[in-house]
Image (cartoon, rainbow, N blue to C red):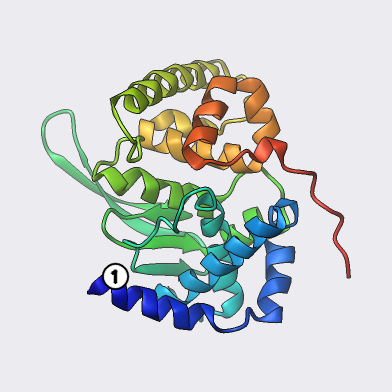
Amino acid sequence: MFTWWRNRRRQRILSRPFPTTWEGWLASHCRHYGRLSAEQQQRLRRDVQLLVAEKSWEGCGGLTVTDEMRVTISAHAALLGLGFDALPFDRLMSVLIYPDTFVSPQRRRTPWGGVEETDEPRLGEAWYQGPVLLSWREVKEQCVENDSGRNVVIHEFAHLLDMQNHEVDGMPALDGPADVQRWTETMQRAFGRLNRQARLGRKTVLDYYGATSEPEFFAVASEAFFERGPQLRTEFPELYNLLRTFYRQDPAAWPPCAAPTG
């Protein structure tokens, strides 16, 4: 019954014309859009419409959420799902947007068995069975203004994919034991290599933040896969091929970005 109702609702959403203003934001606020095939662009527009309409978008810290914010974030989130049969974020209910860095409470066990509670600054965060939290300043800086190789939207929505197997362990839901074994072995080798490079201070396509844990490694690797595909394929070919199989996309083979027009 729920599937029937959802499909009817989505038919109504998708029956509306895609706004011209939104199309302009896709071109200017998502550098990947111009590199996609016509079919991929159509699919991305479709998924952007669904994300904007179906999720609850909430401004925090006095921020008023605009369509520009919704479309920009949705475009980068939808990019991750282009290779899947359907948009993979049905469990996400809401996106919380802060104007800048926000503070998140953290709980950690101490070596002596206690629990330490601290408030830590965050640029983005994904909660298991909860919302995604994002800093709009960081989204604009990474996704729109600077081609730095980082992408906080891809990072946090990769965490949501990780959580689809009900664990936060750096391994998304996979098809079977053979895929799990390949994933585990490939990720362990690449994770270990990044840790060694981080200790030695060697430059790498992967942000050192990925060396903090397996979940963060998957999120950082996903950023590099979409933002620095050719470099990741050269430096970590086994990791690139693993993510290409999982995402069913090949960003390293996309054509170069077209020069902006207008």
- Which of the pair 6/235 is nearer the observer? 6
Residue at position x 15%, y 42% in the image: 115
Residue at position x 80%, y 44% in the image: 256
Residue at position x 54%, y 21% in the image: 238
Residue type, mark 1 in image: Thr
The residue pinned by badge 1 equals: 3
Residue 38 in the image: state x and y as whole percent: 71, 59
Question: Could you classify mark 1 by the number of other residues whose Cα lies within 10 Å: few (under 14), some (14-19), or many (20 or more)?
Answer: few
- Which of the pair 253/239 is nearer the observer? 253
| 95 in relation to 38, above or below | below
| 174 in relation to 197, above or below | below
Picture quarter with the N terminus: bottom left
Residue 152 in the image: state x and y as whole percent: 53, 52
For the residue labelled by badge 1, is the local secondary structure a helix, a strand or a loop?
helix
Q: Is residue 173 left or right of residue 230?
A: left
- Circle count: 1
Residue 158 in the image: state x and y as whole percent: 44, 47
- The quadrant holding residue 89 is bottom left
Residue 73 in the image: state x and y as whole percent: 55, 64
